Every structure is written in C-alpha cells, then in structure tokens.
Image (cartoon, helix red, strand yellow):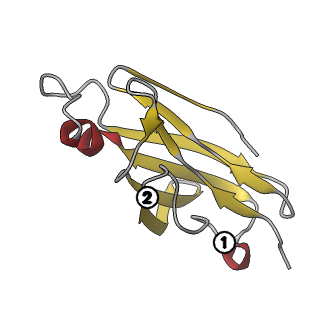
Amino acid sequence: MAEGYLTTHVLDTARGVPAKGVKIALYRLSGNSHRKIAETETNEDGRTDTPILPKEKFAPGTYELVFFAGDYLRASAQAGVEPLFLDQIPLRFGISDPEAHYHVPLLLSAYGYSTYRGS
C-alpha cells in the first residue's frame, strides 16, 4: 500500500502573501487522456486543507495541476488588461516514488510564476 501523498500551496510573490482562494484541479494523465481526480481551493495560508492527492489514492504516474490564477489575480486587483498574460497555469509532473511526499508549490505574480519540488 502506498504511503506517499501530494500537497501544494500558492504564494503571491508580488504582494508577499499566501494566495487565498485559488482554485486548483488535479488530473491524472495516461496517453492522450486527462482525467480529473480532485479539485480544491487554497485557504488563508495559501494551502489546501488536506493533501490534494491523499495516501489512499496516491500512485506513480504523470499528473497535472491546473491553477486558476486568473480568477485570483482579478479578485486581488492584479489582473491588468484582458486577455490576461497568465490565466490557467498547468504544471505537469511525474510521481515515481510511491512512498514519498511530493509537494508542488506555485509562486505567482501577474506576469510570471515558478515552481519546484518542495518538501
């Protein structure tokens, strides 16, 4: 049985605060198929209340997190002119170790973002 799990969080680097209220969808990829397996929203700490992929559903494979950054940027008056430079941000990554904790954060501003594998 797998003991790994997946977490994420979003930081608003332009304002230096956690990004509250960012909708996030998680997809499992297989060939040309995208299957949504979870959807959540960030809390006041910019984190999800529970792992987006908990231990009981965790499995090696290819995944994609989609961050609905445009909605957050509009709500926080950072959006600028439509169409937005950044709206939905997909991050595709692989999980190979079924025993590991994978943490995939998003550092966000209206005109750029970065990510990394955290702990």
Look at mark 1 in the image and give the residue it sits on: 54
State left or right for residue 34 relative to residue 87.
right
Q: Position of residue 58 (x, y in %)?
A: 71, 69
Count of numbered circles in the view: 2
Near-viewer residue (91 or 118): 118
Circle 2 residues within 10 Å: few <14, some 14–19, many ≥20: some
Q: Residue at x 58, y 69 (%)?
A: 50
Query: Circle 2 sits in a helix, a strand or a loop, which is it?
Result: loop
Q: CA distance from mark 2 to mark 1?
A: 17 Å
Of the numbered discs 2 and 1, the one sitting upstream in the chain is 2
**Residue type for callout 1:** Pro
Q: Position of residue 119 (x, y in %)?
A: 76, 46
**Residue type for callout 2:** Asn
Q: Position of residue 54 (x, y in %)?
A: 66, 72
Numbered mark located on residue 93 in the image: none
Query: Circle 1 sits in a helix, a strand or a loop, which is it?
Result: loop
Look at mark 2 in the image and give the residue it sits on: 43
- The answer to whether residue 100 is above or below residue 106 is below
Point out the image quarter for the N terminus: bottom right
| Residue at the left extreme of this rendering | 82
- The answer to whether residue 49 is above or below residue 77 is below
The mark lying in front, picked from 2 and 1, is: 2
Q: Residue at x 61, y 65 (%)?
A: 51
State left or right for residue 3 relative to residue 105.
right
Q: Residue at x 52, y 54 (%)?
A: 47
Q: Position of residue 116 (x, y in %)?
A: 66, 34
Q: Residue at x 43, y 64 (%)?
A: 40
Circle 1 residues within 10 Å: few <14, some 14–19, many ≥20: some
Residue 3 occupies which quadrant of the picture? Answer: bottom right
- Do the CB atoms of the residues marked 2 and 1 lie less than 8 Å apart? no
